[in-house]
Image: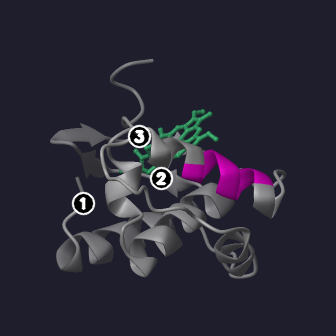
Amino acid sequence: MPGSVPPLVNRIDRIASTPEGRKYLADVLMNGVSGPIKANGTAYSAEMPPFRYLKDEEVAAILSWLSQRGNIKPAPSISATEIATARADRKSAGKVATEREELDRTQPLP
Ligand code: HEM
C-alpha cells in the first residue's frame, strides 16, 4: 500500500539509534499511532492499530529485523525488555503521536 503507511526500512534503524527512539518504536507497536505525522517528507494521517497480542520477543524480533534491513551497520536492535517496559505503560494512539512530535524536536526523525 504505497502512500498510505510510512516506509520503515532505512528509517527504523535511524530512529532506533537512541534509547528515546527505541522507546517510541516500542510505544507504536504497543499502543498504535494516530496521525497526522510526517515521515520522509510525506504526511500521513491514518491510524496504526496496536500489536499487543504479539509477545515481547516477537515484537522485538520484527523491529530488529526491520532495523537490520537499513543502512546503519551494525544495526541497532530492540530488546524484548524495551517492549515489556512499553507494554506496562499503556497510552492512547494519539499520545504516541504527541510523543513523536516531542522526539522529532530533539532527534529529527527521518
Ligand atoms: C508488525 C507490523 C508493523 C510494524 C513493525 C509497524 C511499524 C510502524 C512504525 C514504527 C510506525 C511509525 C513510523 C514513524 O513514526 O515514522 C508506523 C506507522 C503507521 N503504521 Fe505501522 N507497523 C506495522 C503494521 C501496520 C499495519 C498492519 C497497518 C495498517 C493496518 C499499519 C499502519 C500504519 C499507519 C497508518 C501508520 C501512520 C500512522 C499515522 O498516520 O499517524 N501498520 N508503523
Q: Image quarter for residue 32?
A: bottom right
Q: Main secondary structure of the magenta part?
A: helix
Q: Residue furthest top?
A: 1
- Residue annotated with mark 1: 109
- Mark 1: few/some/many CA within 10 Å (<14, 14-19, 20+): some
- Residue annotated with mark 2: 34
Q: Earlier in the sequence, mark 3 or mark 1?
A: 3
Q: Earlier in the sequence, mark 3 or mark 2?
A: 3
Residue at 31%, 57% in the rendered image: 14
Residue at 31%, 75% in the rendered image: 103
Q: Please tell me which residue lies in front, 43 or 64.
A: 64
Q: Is residue 99 visible?
A: yes
Mark in the foreground, 3 or 2: 3
Q: Image quarter for residue 84?
A: bottom right
Q: Earlier in the sequence, mark 1 or mark 2?
A: 2
Tell me how far mark 3 sits from mark 2, CA to CA: 16 Å
Query: Considering only vertical position in the picture, is 34 above or below 99?
Result: above
The reply, left or right, for residue 71 in relation to residue 67 is left
Q: Is residue 60 magenta?
A: yes
Q: Amino acid at mark 2?
A: Ser
- Residue annotated with mark 3: 8
The reply, left or right, for residue 90 in relation to residue 17 is right
Q: Is residue 50 visible?
A: no
Q: Image quarter for residue 78?
A: bottom right
Whether label 3 lies within 8 Å of ligand 1 gets the answer yes
Residue range of the region highlighted in magenta in the rendering: 58-64
Q: Amino acid at mark 1?
A: Leu
Q: Secondary structure at mark 3?
A: loop
